Amino acid sequence: MTISTLGTIAILVLFLLTLATAALAILGAARKSERLVEGAVQGIHGIFGVALFASMLLEYAFLAGDYSIQYVQQNGHPGMPVFYKITAFWGSLDGSLLFWVLLLSLFSSLAIRANRQRHRVLIPHAVATLAIVLGFFAALLLYLKNPFSPYLLSSAPVQGKGMNPLLQNPYMIFHPPSLYLGMVSMAVPFAFAMAALVTGQVDSSWQRSVRRWVLFSWLFLSIGLVLGGLWAYEELGWGGYWAWDPVENAGLLPWLMCTAFLHSAMVQERRGMLKVWNLVLVISSFFMTIYGTYLTRSGVVQSVHAFGESPELAWAFGGLMITIVLVSAVLLIWRWPLLRSRNELESVLSREFAFLLNNWLFFGASVFVAIVVIFPTLTDMPGFRNFYNNVMLPVVHVVNSDAPALVGRITIGPSFYNHYMSPIGLALLFLTGVGPLVAWRKTSGNALIKQFLGPLGFGVLSMSAAAILVPLVRSGEDVAGVCEGCVGGMEFVSVKGLLCFGLCGFTFWTIVQEYYRGVRVRRKHRKQSVLDALIGLILKARRRYGGYIVHLGVVLMFLGFAGNSYKLEKKLVMYPGEVVELGDHQIRHDGILATQDWQKDMLTVHMSVLDENGELLAELEPAKWWYYQLKDQPTTEASRYIAPEGDVYASIADVQLSDGWTRLNLYFNPLVNWVWLGFAVMLAGGVICIGTRKEDAEGVA
């Protein structure tokens, strides 16, 4: 029996098993039969076993070079390194869906096993929900995107085409699986939220069971987003790491919702408030994972990262999203009387209100991005254009009087997102600092002044230091060689950067203040060094102080974002021996070298980075690579000089070997490495939080 036939049989068994498991769970819950429920539980474990078997078959097909399978032939190649043969499993559409099923079945099995005795009433309904979601993806594999489909010709290809060269990058080994882990695991909180609504057990117990799952999702979504940014920064050669691409946004949408839930969950635990809101956030987080999958796999948006066009998948995911919204809305309305809060908001000067504002901003940002990312596709539809021009446009003109009527498909670029999202980001950074400064229920005026005095002072000091150390005005020649929006040949740096520096200082001092007070109290009662007291403080209240570490990471990342306001860019032609200035650095073209290896041809430009005195700081080697199996898809290999104050970054746009003519993109990206450092700190804080003890109910994230 061929691998293709065996794999297809495995997918058929997988689909039938999901149907049987869902039926057993529903019947077991209706009849209150422990035997039927236990059968459903074993069915979930069985689904994982079959999914694992099918995944191992596909991996074996890649490693063995079975090019009679279409998916393997389209994504595999004998010359690919073993690492990339393994990652080719999830590198394209069909395999990514199987990988989704594998992860979801694993998480379902683990979650049900962990909660089988603790939440006996919820378990059958959670199992039914998970089995139905698994059945949906199994049906896609069986009927639409079978990764084991063979070539029907008498002679199958003897060699594969190979993976997209852009994906043959170390970051791509970990970036897609991280996003999958984050997105797929959100099905577990969703399943328990549905079970809580169906059974009417909508107190905080279900929430405590899923909080770690949401935090797990948040951690891996964070890892996936940052690794994706690093890949874009080093591989695409455009000098940036985030461009609001639809596929980038697909991971951001559930991340925003998860972040909102992790904050609002504490309000329900502490004050018995926001019950409806927390359920809405969990449902919305799962919905956004499906919406993101719809964006990347249906072809409804244009993206360099998308998996291609598939109208059938577009309809399938559209139907699933409508089902999620309708079923969730009916259950929420049905259980509305049980979801009333025990307490009410007492003051706007309270931590509850700060968290509520925080939630509104995260939720609003996610919805805004979700609408904007699909808007260009909607403008292709004549019916939508007529509706927009005749009904929506008068409303839009209230906000933006220059908004034009729709004629054809429009394109929404990064500047549009940045215009609206930058203020939201700054507001969230401010609230990150405000949350720990205000008390639960109500904060008195004297306490408010005392709490805010230090952070506000340090914030003003930080903004003043940034204004002194970095020039507010610079020559327009330093900006892409063009002086757009300049006055008298000079460009004025955006005040958003200065404000961001100030808010970073404000929030940083808030965190320092909280740690200082905690350490001081601990040392007052114990004879400990500062370091021992700090470690003991974190271990005793991991959720609270781990959350502060997450916030510290956010502050460091925002320092990197603020540095982007001072970015320098030059696009120019250089010949060997030429020297150009880039801010305080000089860039010298030293020559071109043509080489090759067993996998590709390479053109490398050798350059030197010099300081103001002409002393050598670093050597850069930007390159163009042409892989033999896909010579029509050259890759751009950027090179950078890394320093705490920023990167000198170079990439090749075009090159001629005959005379050394080279068209280059040169950038100076101030503070960009603080983004990656901040992520590492944020990840460390998240790991601390995920190990929280049950009794540690108070925290910040």
Image: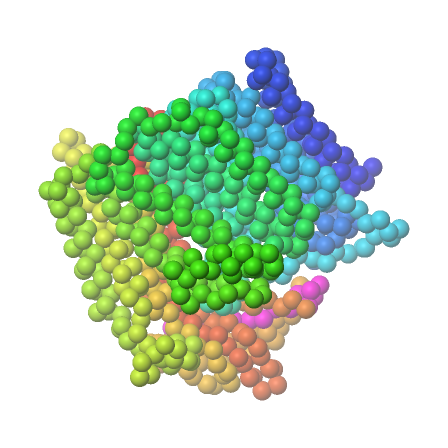
Q: Residue furthest front?
A: 390
Image quadrant in which the C terminus is located: top left
22 sits left or right of 641 in the view = right
* Percent position of residue 273, x then y: 32, 31
The answer to whether residue 411 is above or below residue 593 is above
In the foreground, 31 or 16: 31
**Residue 5 shows up from this direction:** yes
User: At 59% from the left edge and 47% from the top edge, which residue is drawn?
Assistant: 294
Query: Was residue 397 drawn as part of the magenta stretch in this picture?
Result: no
Q: Residue furthest left?
A: 446
Q: Nearer the viewer, residue 184 or 614?
A: 184
What residue range appears in magenta?
616-631
Q: Position of residue 496 (x, y in %)?
A: 31, 63
* Number of marks in the rendered image: 0
Query: Against 661, is 319 above or below?
Result: above
**Which image quarter: residue 519?**
top left
Q: Position of residue 374 (x, y in %)?
A: 54, 54
Q: Quadrant of the N terminus?
A: top right
Choose between 359 and 393: the one closer to the eye.
Answer: 393
Q: Residue furthest right?
A: 154
Is residue 618 highlighted in magenta?
A: yes
Visual colour scheme: rainbow
Q: Is residue 425 above or below residue 114?
A: below
Left or right: 83 with respect to 514? right
Q: Quadrant of residue 149?
A: top right
Q: Is residue 595 left or right of residue 474?
A: right
Determine the main secondary structure of the stretch shown in magenta: strand
Q: Residue at x 53, y 43 (%)?
A: 289
Q: Evaluate whether residue 52 shows in this view.
A: no
Question: Residue at image x 15%, y 30%?
Answer: 525
Residue that appears at 76% across and 50% down = 70
